[in-house]
Image (spheres, helix red, strand yellow):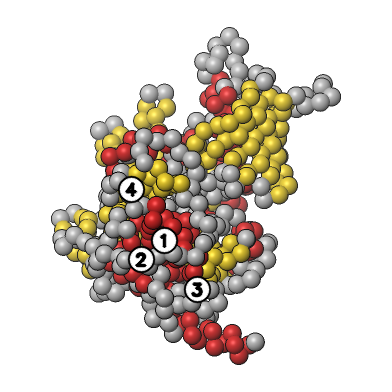
């Protein structure tokens, strides 16, 4: 058996890199594993059959651009290939929210979805049945492309067009990097597991294009918890595609998964988190820097905190006025693409450090204030490991608020004094560098930065920290990965009681829904945005000062977060129900 495994390792590691045009090629047998999940293995033969079935459904479909609103990587792969072989263009909006899809109706001609949608355009429901292929597909056109949406600087989704040739080139670069960074661990016999949705560029490139290019299977389900990752590595070692949001909340007490390599992108990975993740996963974290517009730009595997970023071969940076311009084989524009990030190059080469962004400049009292500079000054202090600053307005005055994660030294200083004395020390230090209006007026200390599913700072949750919207958490009990119970004290000073109502304040139902979503994200690691609410019942009013028991259950397959609030009143034998419901979370 060992000899057979060794032969398999050598065979797969020596395979030529496979381009998307040949992903369905007859060169490989039907039983080649493509995607793995708890229910079993999906093979190349089944993929061929599912692609052909959808390709036939698209024969009379109007228009060229079809939006893909599907929940897992395998179903997305089926839709991508069927559209490309049919000569159409896939559009990946990154969500399946009906109202937002209606706003984007001009961007696509129809929708392919694995869940029912009510939308004013042609809709194809995709439920792969894994039947054998009945047709031979035509070749994919040389000019095939896809369109993917990212958050624009104006707040509206921005469409980015990517040629399939560009995506294939990027996948080859990544395959080369994987082989370089996992020299002592064979790639063959592993699976790619991702904690990042395939609906965004990083998850699409690393979680789908990379394994298909290398010829290794990928996990159909996104890994949402460390425990889930451990289960996914029980049968095969994993190449883990992750993000700072996931890697900063690892439980070091859990048994380590069998991991041949780990990647992180989508935001800055704190040095302490990088060290802890590398230790637990027994693999140094490979960090990736890039953007949706440019594709991957650089990588690094830090042995020290200050190790620089190393550009991929073929990446060229050019200085143009006050901004950097980058060109590469991944960028279609001949003139290249401007970067919003500021880079500081080290030595004579093109290795660099990230030095903030150009576009984070605000005006306070007629003075231009760089939020990036403030963050850099704060994180330069020995007591702080990570910082995010946000502009806030209180009492009609605009100022800066700082959210920080403390180092061990900072935590010790906090225990020896108070938050007020510690922040006064910080303010005195910063005043030697910054204008008075740029020194943060309000400070919040957190154990970990709130982040979105893509690993970026969650601006809504950062801002909420300054406006006392949450109750006092007395205790929490996690009975399973999908169930939790919290005891919450309703503070009379909460934001929600302002004007609701002046004579007899009660807690709005909206607050109860928001709290359920907040603790669902924090305790059960749910992801997604509000997509509706079912079976909601508000049975009793909640008054200031009362204590509530919040019960949560996450049904991942249905993407439903069930909540139930009960009143904890020692004068009553039974805890009466306050409210309950089912919150639909969309990817």
Report whether residue 311 is seen.
no
From the image, tell me which residue sits under label 3: 30
- Residue 280, quarter of picture: bottom right
Residue 98, position in %: x, y? 42, 36
Q: Is residue 501 above or below residue 381?
A: above
Looking at the image, the residue that sits furthest to the top is 503
User: Between disc 1 and disc 4, whose residue precedes?
Assistant: 1
Q: Residue at x 59, y 40 (%)?
A: 560
In the rendered image, which quarter contains the N terminus? bottom right
From the image, tell me which residue sits under label 4: 61
Report whether residue 332 is seen.
yes
Q: Residues within 10 Å of mark 1 (few under 14, many from 20)?
A: many
Query: What is the CA distance from the residue labelled 3 to the residue labelled 1?
Result: 14 Å
Query: What is the CA distance from the residue labelled 3 to the residue labelled 4?
Result: 29 Å
Residues at badges 2 and 1 in contact (C-beta under 8 Å)?
Answer: yes
User: Between disc 3 and disc 4, whose residue precedes?
Assistant: 3
From the image, tell me which residue sits under label 2: 137
User: Between disc 4 and disc 2, whose residue precedes?
Assistant: 4
Residues at badges 1 and 4 in contact (C-beta under 8 Å)?
Answer: no
Looking at the image, the residue that sits furthest to the bottom is 3
Q: Residues within 10 Å of mark 2 (few under 14, many from 20)?
A: some
From the image, tell me which residue sits under label 1: 52
| Of residues 541 and 380, the one drawn nearer to the viewer in this rendering | 541
- Locate residue 487 relative to residue 346 in the image: left or right: right
């Amino acid at each position: 058996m060992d000899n057979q495994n060794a032969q398999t390792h050598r065979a797969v590691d020596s395979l030529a890199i496979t381009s998307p045009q040949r992903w369905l090629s007859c060169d490989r047998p039907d039983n080649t594993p493509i995607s793995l999940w708890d229910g079993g293995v999906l093979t190349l033969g089944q993929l061929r059959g599912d692609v052909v079935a959808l390709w036939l459904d698209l024969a009379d479909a109007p228009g060229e651009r079809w939006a893909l609103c599907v929940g897992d990587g395998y179903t997305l792969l089926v839709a991508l290939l069927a559209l490309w072989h049919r000569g159409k263009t896939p559009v990946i909006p990154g969500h399946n929210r009906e109202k937002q899809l209606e706003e984007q109706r001009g961007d696509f001609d129809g929708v392919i979805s694995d869940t029912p949608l009510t939308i004013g355009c042609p809709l194809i429901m995709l439920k792969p049945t894994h039947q054998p292929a009945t047709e031979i597909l035509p070749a994919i056109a040389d000019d095939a492309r896809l369109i993917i949406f990212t958050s624009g600087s104006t707040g509206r989704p921005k469409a980015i067009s990517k040629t399939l040739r560009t995506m294939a080139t990027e996948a080859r670069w990544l395959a080369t990097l994987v082989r370089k960074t996992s020299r002592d661990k064979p790639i063959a016999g592993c699976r790619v597991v991702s904690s990042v949705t395939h609906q965004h560029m990083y998850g699409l490139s690393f979680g789908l294009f990379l394994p298909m290019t290398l010829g290794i299977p990928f996990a159909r389900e996104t890994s949402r918890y460390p425990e889930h990752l451990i289960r996914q590595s029980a049968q095969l070692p994993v190449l883990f595609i992750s993000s700072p949001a996931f890697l900063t909340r690892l439980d070091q007490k859990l048994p380590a998964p069998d991991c041949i390599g780990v990647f992180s992108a989508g935001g800055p990975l704190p040095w302490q988190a990088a060290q802890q993740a590398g230790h637990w996963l027994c693999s140094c974290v490979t960090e990736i820097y890039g953007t949706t517009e440019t594709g991957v730009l650089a990588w690094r595997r830090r042995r020290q905190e200050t190790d620089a970023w190393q550009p991929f071969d073929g990446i060229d940076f050019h200085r143009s006025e006050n901004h950097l311009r980058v060109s590469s084989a991944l960028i279609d524009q001949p003139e290249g693409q401007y970067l919003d990030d500021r880079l500081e190059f080290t030595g004579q080469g093109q290795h660099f450090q990230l030095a903030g962004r150009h576009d984070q400049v605000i005006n306070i009292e007629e003075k231009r204030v760089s939020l990036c500079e403030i963050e850099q000054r704060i994180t330069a202090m020995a007591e702080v490991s990570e910082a995010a600053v946000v502009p806030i307005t209180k009492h009609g005055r605009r100022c800066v608020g700082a959210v920080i994660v403390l180092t061990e030294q900072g935590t010790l200083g906090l225990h020896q004094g108070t938050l007020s004395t510690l922040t006064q020390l910080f303010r005195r230090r910063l005043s030697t560098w910054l204008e008075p209006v740029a020194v943060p007026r309000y400070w919040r200390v957190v154990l970990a930065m709130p982040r979105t599913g893509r690993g970026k700072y969650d601006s809504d949750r950062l801002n909420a920290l300054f406006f006392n919207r949450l109750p006092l958490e007395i205790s929490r009990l996690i009975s399973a990965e999908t169930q939790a119970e919290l005891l919450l004290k309703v503070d009379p000073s909460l934001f929600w009681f302002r004007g609701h109502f002046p004579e007899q304040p009660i807690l709005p139902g909206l607050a109860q829904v928001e709290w359920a979503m907040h603790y669902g994200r924090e305790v059960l690691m749910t992801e997604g945005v509000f997509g509706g609410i079912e079976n909601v019942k508000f049975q009793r009013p909640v008054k200031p000062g009362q204590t509530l028991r919040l019960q949560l259950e996450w049904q991942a397959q249905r993407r439903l977060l069930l909540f139930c609030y009960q009143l904890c009143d020692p004068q009553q034998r039974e805890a009466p129900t306050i409210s309950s419901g089912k919150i639909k979370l969309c990817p």
